[in-house]
Image: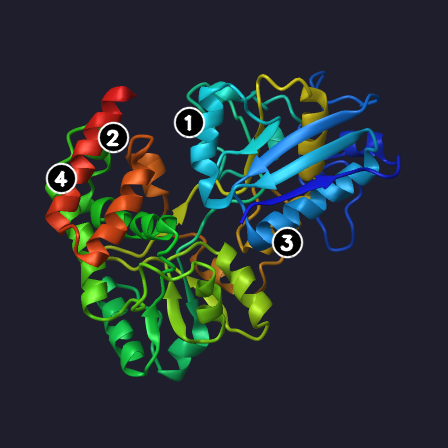
Amino acid sequence: MKKKQMLYAIGLSALLAAAGCSGGGNEAPSAGKAAPSQTPATSSSPAKETKPVKLTMMTNATGVTFDTIQAIITSFTKENPTITVDFSTQGKDYEQLMKAKMASNDLPDLFATHGWSVNRYSEYLRPLNDQPWFGSLTDTIKPTISDKKGNVFVLPLNIDQSGIVYNKKVLADLKLAVPKTWEELLAASKAIKNAGLTPIYVGGKDTTKLAGFFNKLAPILLVSDKAHNFGHSLKDGTFDWSNWTTVSQQLVLLKNEGYLNKDVVTADPLSAAEKLATGKAAFLFENNAVVAEAKKLNPDAQIGMMPVPAFYPGDEPILNGGEREAFGVSKQSKNTEAALLLLNYMAKSDNIAKVAAATGMPAGLKDVNYDLGGLTEDYKTYGSLRTIPVFDREFLPNGMWSTLKIIGPALLTGDMSPEESSRMMKDDYNKLRSQQ
């Protein structure tokens, strides 16, 4: 459901501090908080706003993530009484809306790039290399959000470094180890099913959840293993699409073995957090943002993050990575100074820490002290594993997210065979690649 709130400022205070301390660097850190290093402010840094300004800002984030960012914006407007912010989320409809806005040249002042700051949105965004926080970008995210010239177009509040979310108590009660291979995951799923629980839960009523499932699954079949690494051929147009059939077959296998929830195609995506929190489901092929939703429902839930298991013998588990909550400023914004002021306020270390903690994902800027709760130990254990970029963003042409959304439900209902899914993937790949 669309959420929209007008955020109005009340008092005038700390405006110069907000502009001068952006990036979380120069302000005195609060107790337990480390201030990140940052480059000095340049002549392009935002100046004080004295005239009334209304900013428009859009995101695809929902739930706890949206609420956390909204609270940060509320604090900003209290300190900047001449600026109001119309902040809204379109949820799963965001991508299509943004495509329409690009086509009509009617973009908001600030907007989330949902993983596509370079490949899709860079021509519409103002480069941000001159901003105070630029020197504090983490080494993990900087290559992902930089174009070939080294330009960065977004402030990354956090990093989408994740694997599979799971209920630790379910595995412990059944004396199951965290699966390191696909065969071990299947064996664990069988034991979980026999215990009367759902091994893998997918809220497939939102087809993006099934597309996201492929983004977790495809890398371990098509990229991570040296003998089955088709990364280059996926990028240069020579990929043999019969290899995709194996990817689709795994989804069908999970359904046929009863390892997915029976209502997988019609299940409300919001129910996934509840099933995880109450121990009715063991695994979610989702990023860590769902953990916060689950913990709201059951604060005592023992929830963790595990890597995506290796599919081929001899391969190692992986994590998926890329942009998460990242915002840029439209090139054509008539309110650039105010937009940069807001962006720099969001870059303060305390605000970056809030978003990291709320989403259960690492911060996008260095030297920010944050707490990932129950996931902290998991990141200590798995954070150094190979992190492969989100599959559709890295290896497929722009637009194939829609194809993944189509083939998932069709495979599960039997309307499409794995072989037919490969043909659709090939056709859409060739069509979209020729357009780009």
302 to 382, vertically: above or below: below
Instruction: Say if 290 sits above or below 39 in the image.
Output: below
- Report which residue position mark 2 lands on: 235
Disc on the earlier residue, 1 or 4: 1
Q: In x, y percent, where is residue 48?
A: 81, 23
Disc number lying in front (3 or 2): 2
Local secondary structure at mark 2: helix
CA distance for labels 2 and 1: 16 Å
Q: Secondary structure at mark 3?
A: loop
Q: Is residue 52 above or below residue 365?
A: above
Q: Secondary structure at mark 1?
A: loop
Instruction: Using the image, tell me which numbered label, if any, was put on residue 162.
Output: none
Confirm or deny contact between disc 4 and disc 2 (CB under 8 A): no
**Callout 3 amino acid:** Tyr
Question: Given the image, on which type of amino acid does mark 2 rest?
Answer: Lys
Task: State the image quarter where residue 177 is shown.
Answer: bottom left
Q: Residue at x 32, y 66 (%)?
A: 263
Q: Nearer the viewer, residue 144 or 268?
A: 268
Q: Nearer the viewer, mark 3 or mark 1?
A: 1
How far apart are labels 4 and 2 at the CA level? 18 Å
408 or 156: nearer the eye?
Answer: 408
Q: Which residue is mark 4?
A: 423
Residue 180 is left or right of residue 40, and the answer is left
Choose the circle earlier in sequence order: 4 or 2.
2
Q: Say which amino acid is labelled 1.
A: Arg
Is 197 on the left-hand or right-hand side of 288? left
